[in-house]
Image: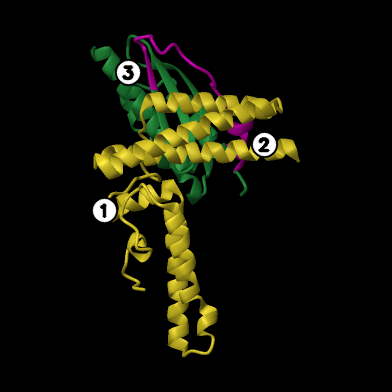
Chain colours: A green, B yellow
Amino acid sequence: MAYSDKVLDHYENPRNVGSLDKADTHVGTGMVGAPACGDVMKLQIRVNDDGVIEDAKFKTYGCGSAIASSSLVTEWLKGKSLDQAMTIKNSDIAEELALPPVKIHCSVLAEDAIKAAIADLKQKQAA
Amino acid sequence: MNIQQTHFELFGLPTTFDLDTKKLDQQYRLLQSEVHPDRFAASADSERRLSLQYATKANEAYQTLKNPLTRARYLLQLKGIDTQEESNTAMPVDFLLQLMEWREALEEAAETANADELEALKKKLREAAKTLQSTLASALDIDRDDAIATETVRKLRFIDKAQQEVDQALEILES
């Protein structure tokens, strides 16, 4: 199957690969997995005291579309508030990367990872 | 043979995860010879069509029951439970962390052409699959805990996929 140029670009030069300190109270970690394709995704965000996302990192084991989806969202997340981040939809990701229908679940994985990371952060900050 | 029967009924087996695989093989061969389309070569069209339908069902039922993952999924389906392997991405974090570690090891072993490491990983995954299968046996047959069974099917699907990838990496090394 042919990947779009944007998927290839993110796949070959993934942005923001790596990890943030999981124990930091300003860091939220989201881990999700797609049983059907075996992909695993870890997405981390760090917010400043104003609640703005200043850094995002990811680590994904999966196909090119899953890697590209997570790479793309780390770029999108930076500079956004948590509320803004919550509005990122899998359809936006799929559209930007021109994902074919069989790869839509990769963008769903990225959206769910964002939500999981935000939930983790909120839980930590409420504690 | 009745097209409405469940896969278990078809082979005269109890509806359980723990399965007598020898009996499954025997019953399958028996059924296959009974409904084989060749036996109906001289029969009427309608009967030939029916025999083909039966043979297809028998084959599908056999494949489903033979594999522990598909057997467990089928048992849950019979209870009306969808394992949501396509749509639900929430998994226990400790499981995902472990999986990530294995995927990392796999990637590194494949890149460095380390066959020993791949074999070691293969063994670990096989053990993980075995543990999950015994969890399935107790969740489905003894405790009737559908939530645990569903989660275990989902885990096993990940392990299955990782095993396939280890095998592929080994094949590449051997070729």
Establish whether labels 1 and 2 are both on one chain. Answer: yes
Whether A47 is drawn above or below A14: the answer is above
Q: Which residues are magenta?
A: A4-29
The residue drawn where x is 57% and y is 41% is: B164
Q: Are marks 1 and 3 in contact (CB under 8 Å)?
A: no
Q: Which residue is mark 1?
A: B80
Query: Marks 3 and 2, how far apart in space?
Result: 40 Å
Label 3 secondary element = helix
Indicate whether residue A27 is drawn in magenta: yes
Residue at the right extreme of this rendering = B175
State the residue in front, A90 or A1: A1
Nearer mark to the viewer, of 1 and 3: 1
Amino acid type, label 3: Leu
Query: Marks 1 and 2, how far apart in space?
Result: 39 Å
| B11 relative to A59 in the view: left or right | left
For mark 1, name the chain. Answer: B
Amino acid type, label 1: Gly
Residue B12: quarter of image: bottom left
Badge number at residue B170 = 2
